[in-house]
Amino acid sequence: MNSNSVKMPVSQMKGIGPKISQSMKERGIITIDDLLYFLPLKYIDRRTIHRIADLKEGQRGNIIATVTSYRSLFFRHARKKGYEVIVGDKTGNLSLKWFQWSKSYLKMICKKGNILFLSGQVSRFGAAIQMIHPDVIVLEDEAESPDLKKILPLYSPMDGVKQGILRKLTEDALNLCGNDVKCIFPESVEEHFDLIPLPAAFRHIHCPEEDWYQEGPRHKYMERLILEEYMLFQSALWMNRTEYKREKGIAFHQHGPLYKKFTGKLPFALTDAQKRVVREIENDMISAEPMNRLVQGDVGSGKTICAVIASCLVIDSGYQVAFMAPTEILAEQHFLSVHRYFEALNIPVIFLRGNMGKNRKAVLDGIKSGNTSVIIGTHAIIQKDVTFHKLGLVVIDEQHRFGVLQRKWLIEKGLLPDVLMMTATPIPRTLSMVVYGDLDVSIIDEMPKGRQSIKTKLFLDDDKAKVYEMVEEEIKKGHQIYIVYPLVEESDKMELLNATKMASHFQKSVFARYRIGLLHGSMKAEEKEETMNRFKNKMIDILVCTTVIEVGIDVPNATMIVIEHAERFGLSQLHQLRGRVGRGTHASKCVLVTSSRRTALATKRLRIMEKTTDGFKIAEEDMLIRGVGDMLGTRQSGIPRFRVGDIIRDMDLMLRARNICTESLPRLTAENLKEIKDAIQDRWGETFHAHA
Ligand code: ADP
Ligand code: MG
């Protein structure tokens, strides 16, 4: 959509005053383009108008009739309320009935003498014929009659803007600039792929002349609009990807001394999946194109060692590697595991803390001079005052927490390292191509042998006593436990209430004999760290917490996790949480507690957790149940908002868009590409920072 007239604010259109413009704004309609994308919910076919006398039971009828009376109904046997409006034309009377209604809706209809257009299923009640919940349009005056015999779109109700006005304005908008609605690609591409021109698609959708919409909600015109926005999205990914590849990268040496030393005596045999992923990473690294790869693998699948092998190539080639995690706790965790591997190689590793005091200068000097090869910290390490000697690789853990990678920061510092991202959030494969379409993706879909199993069991609130008994048994074995509470309505205050209240409750009564710790998001970073350390050092038996423990925390002696209000979590999130246990040599348990009022659907969902520990399977189910946006958190995932498309329902169109893009984009002129790029910025500037 690159023409200016469609970008005109609707407030400048004739017939739109401040009131309508405000109502529209509340529905997200600012420009004419937005108005055109405010699509009808359904259509009413008024081309044939019936007479009441001719109506037959079971048929769909269209009637124009006058309101003669109305009254409320009460059906004693069914204990049900209803509302009835009687209308008539020259040939007879018809009863309209509602069993659910809004006051304002009925008020609009119930005026003696109102002329209504009605469309609905005809049924019989005793001797009389009736329509239940018909579609109604109040015909305002005679002026509407020339237009009467049309197919009318019905839009979602908008405060203070009647359907008739909305239709009129949309039609005006189409007449005004319908032809300026342009495909992001040049006409030649549209023709080559046999795409319906956008102006025609909009016209058919807003002013249909035939009842093509019988095809269902995903009719061909809708598909065209979905395809258009998917093409824009896929173009963005393609551009990210090609721009990235065009940069100069580093061709690392593959079989240097450190690499040989490390891979020659690994502490364990790599799984086949790890071997494959290491191969993919190495191939990227020895090539002169920069690497931009994401490794997806369940918690415990062994991603870290892949990154360590990659680091060997970096150090052998005389470069430095930076490991980054979203929080300081996680960075430290990383430090501990990475450190172990490098220690054996005699390579010093620096953990760059937020507050290092006097040491900081010496540490920074070490990084600047190149004496330090491995640096670990939060992503602040590329933002702040750190100067690298020769940064060759950045390893980013839990990429989805970073949002779209701020590669800009690196480039601003004159750094063009390879980038390796790692995430333990499995995403269904099809979706991963969409979400991470601008990255190369490697998947570790196999667990190292001999992993401790985690038994998952669902409990009702009423069985809490049993759960507490199990907790106590574990503690008696010398193990530790997590008890997790959800964030209630995303409000930090409520979060505090739950975890905090329960922690003190436990300490006072149920688990008075044991040591209880508390960890939640509103605590200061140092407090969190202190608590985590105490838990790690076995000074806490039960850690009561919120989802702050979700990612990457590694305490092998913790063998049980209890998740309260489990129904409030997404399956993928439960899976992440469950990954906190089963990390040591002891068999572990995950207990999901849910209230007895839970719905059948919630139970069904949670049972999936009992059945499988495969993160990809769980992600697939989660996606089907909750939809993509909820599952990933749209903001974090880098998936923009789509106006028409639904990622799951319209996955086929996403693939089609991707094919169109990969085939056409390389052939477009610089000017074409610039236009597309502007359109992306215009539409999703926020999501695609990386372009800036
Ligand atoms: P994650 O993918 O969650 O980051 P880690 O890399 O932390 O997993 O690995 C989890 C644990 O499994 C570590 O203690 C690691 O040493 C061990 N590990 C990794 N790969 C293997 C393997 N192939 N065989 C046995 N143990 C492994
Ligand atoms: Mg890890």
Image (spheres, rainbow, N blue to C red):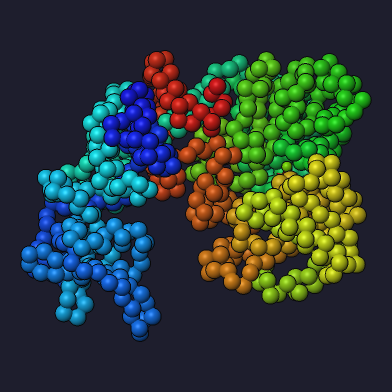
358 relative to 151 in the view: left or right: right
Relative image position of residue 584 (x, y in whole percent): 80, 54
599 or 55: nearer the eye? 55
Q: Is residue 163 visible?
A: yes
82 relative to 208 in the view: left or right: right
The residue shown at (57%, 26%) is 690
Relative image position of residue 103 (x, y in whole percent): 36, 62
593 relative to 212 in the view: left or right: right
The residue shown at (56%, 27%) is 689
- Quadrant containing the N terminus is top left
Relative image position of residue 599 (x, y in whole percent): 54, 68
Which quadrant of the view contains residue 80? Answer: bottom left
Relative image position of residue 692 (x, y in whole percent): 55, 22
437 or 281: nearer the eye? 437
Q: Is residue 182 visible?
A: no
Tally the numbered discs. Answer: 0
508 or 480: nearer the eye? 508
Give the answer, above or below, for where 575 lies relative to 463: above
330 relative to 298 in the view: left or right: right
The residue shown at (82%, 65%) is 506
Q: Quadrant of ligand 2?
A: top right
Give the answer, above or below, for where 244 lies relative to 481: above
Give the answer, above or below, for where 4 lies relative to 637: above
The residue shown at (11%, 60%) is 50
Which quadrant of the view contains residue 111? Answer: bottom left
